[in-house]
Amino acid sequence: MKNQWIEFFYGRVTVKVSGKGTERFLNVLTRNGLLIWNVKRHGTETITFKMRLMDAKNIRHYARKSDCTISFLRRSGVPFLLKRAIKNSGFLGGAGIFLLILMFLSNVIWGIEIKGAKPATEYQIRKELDKMGVQIGKLQFFVDNVEGIQRKLTNNIGELTWVGVELKGTTFHLQVVEKNEPQKPKQLSPRNLIAKKKAIIVNMYIENGQKVVDINDHVEPGQLLVSGAIGQEGTPELVAAKGEVWGETWYKSHVELPLVTNFKVFSGKEKEKHFILLGNYELPVWGFGKPEFSNYETEENVHKIHFLKWELPISYLNKTLREREEVQRTYSNKDAQQIAIELAKKQIKGRIDEDAIIKDEKILHKAIKNGKVILDIHFKVIENIAVGQPISKETSE
Amino acid sequence: MAKKWAGRVRNWMAKKMDLPEDVMMDLPRITMIGQIHVYIENHRGLLVFTDRELRLLLKQGQLLIKGKSFVIKTILPEEILLEGKIDQVIYINDNPGGEK
């Protein structure tokens, strides 16, 4: 028996034969090796049967010799299906293009929402995002990943303490926490100004209040500098003393600096590798082979492809291998001392107010021990030493 | 006469050597499955085919199958598979000279 499926693949036709001697015609066909099945009679002079498409091409040759007329009724099987598919390829193409467009649009940034930022900061964030290429209408594919955006934003905008970047579908959600500059409490209540540190007063600038000490006075911490009680003796008027008292204060700093330090730095040599991620499998696309350097760090960057709200299991992976070099830094004794002083200055600056000035430094003790420079430095700093202290009613009376 | 002798020898050999007769003597082998299928091997061509009747040429005589709603499921040079409701299978022997 014939195999139905093979006939299906090769294609089959239904043939109608009419005329006298249809039986003879069938005999001729079978004897010539043509496969025929499903022979049915319709009326006295007509039969229909099915045959293979490739046999149907030869049938006219035999039909000419007999006095039958033949016509083809139905065609079925893969060749005809293909023909129809090509004819209707517009539909198929349309469906394909639709999916492609949908996929393309799913990968476009459609919105950037910024929450928790003041308008000024928001404007700044938007400007920064524009610089990075994060704009409405841009492809997500060519934009940094979320961590990168987050890092850049926090680095480049000073007002931000923290920014959380989240990509939900096609919208970037930015949750912003701004640095809140501590507001100076309004000190309207009567107060004195007292010294917060031991100092020698260098300069005074008093807006309000009665000064008690003078320039070049030595003050101890807690000592009254400016009194809030003004007016005649006996009937003092209590006001909030206001002003700046600049005093020379002293700091000691202890620094240790190793003469020889090992650093890890990037040499600038790098190799890029491109992959297509299929699930967990990394299919290399470009950049084969091992890098010519052995000591390196790898940075991975994954660009995901979205379809509607889903992430496709296919994504693009970019690896950058950067060569790492160990560098030894050696200071001479003189250099080391200089740098140690700078280091100490930085330390001090962290401890004092921003408007304070380092006036002078003096090395008290210097030693080189165990490959380290050890310095004790004495700093003279001029800073505002005045601190408000509220006057309680009990003490004033 | 010679043909008859040959036929006799074949018949004898088939009987004595226990060979299947359809091979030795060019007889048709007819397999029927109930009333619905007839499978005929070793025929010599189609003579008449309607939905009530099928007439096949054999080496000797003809085979007539009668029934209802006949469809030839497969036809090969020497085989035929007929489907339908079969009522009668008749051998027609009256015209021994019908052979070409």
Image (tube, coloured by chain):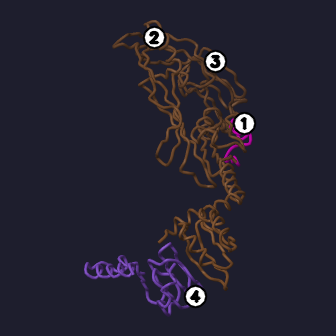
Chain colours: A brown, B purple
Q: Earlier in the sequence, mark 3 or mark 2?
A: 3
x 58%, y 46%: residue: A304
- Amino acid at dot 4: Ser
Mark 2 Cα shell of 10 Å, populated few (<14), some (14-19), many (≥20) = many
Tags 1 and 3 both on a single chain: yes
Please state the chain letter of the residue tagged with numbered disc 1 in the rendered image.
A
Q: Which mark is residue A127?
A: 1
Q: Earlier in the sequence, mark 1 or mark 3?
A: 1
In the image, A85 versus A145, the foreground residue is: A85
Measure the C-alpha gap from mark 3 to mark 4: 132 Å
Q: Earlier in the sequence, mark 2 or mark 1?
A: 1
In terms of image quadrants, where is residue A360? top right
Residue A397 visible within the image: no
Residue A29 visible within the image: yes
- Amino acid at dot 3: Asp
Check if residue A120 falls in the magenta segment.
yes
Closer to viewer: mark 1 or mark 3: 1
Q: Which residues are magenta?
A: A110-130
Q: Name the residue that disc number 4 marks.
A: B69
- Give SS at disc 3: loop
- Amino acid at dot 1: Lys
Residue pushed farthest bottom? B87
Measured as percent of width and height from the top left, residue A30 is found at 54, 71
Q: Name the residue that disc number 3 marks.
A: A214
Tags 1 and 4 both on a single chain: no
Please state the chain letter of the residue tagged with numbered disc 4 in the rendered image.
B
Measured as percent of width and height from the top left, residue A176 is found at 64, 44
Q: Name the residue that disc number 2 marks.
A: A336
Closer to viewer: mark 3 or mark 4: 4
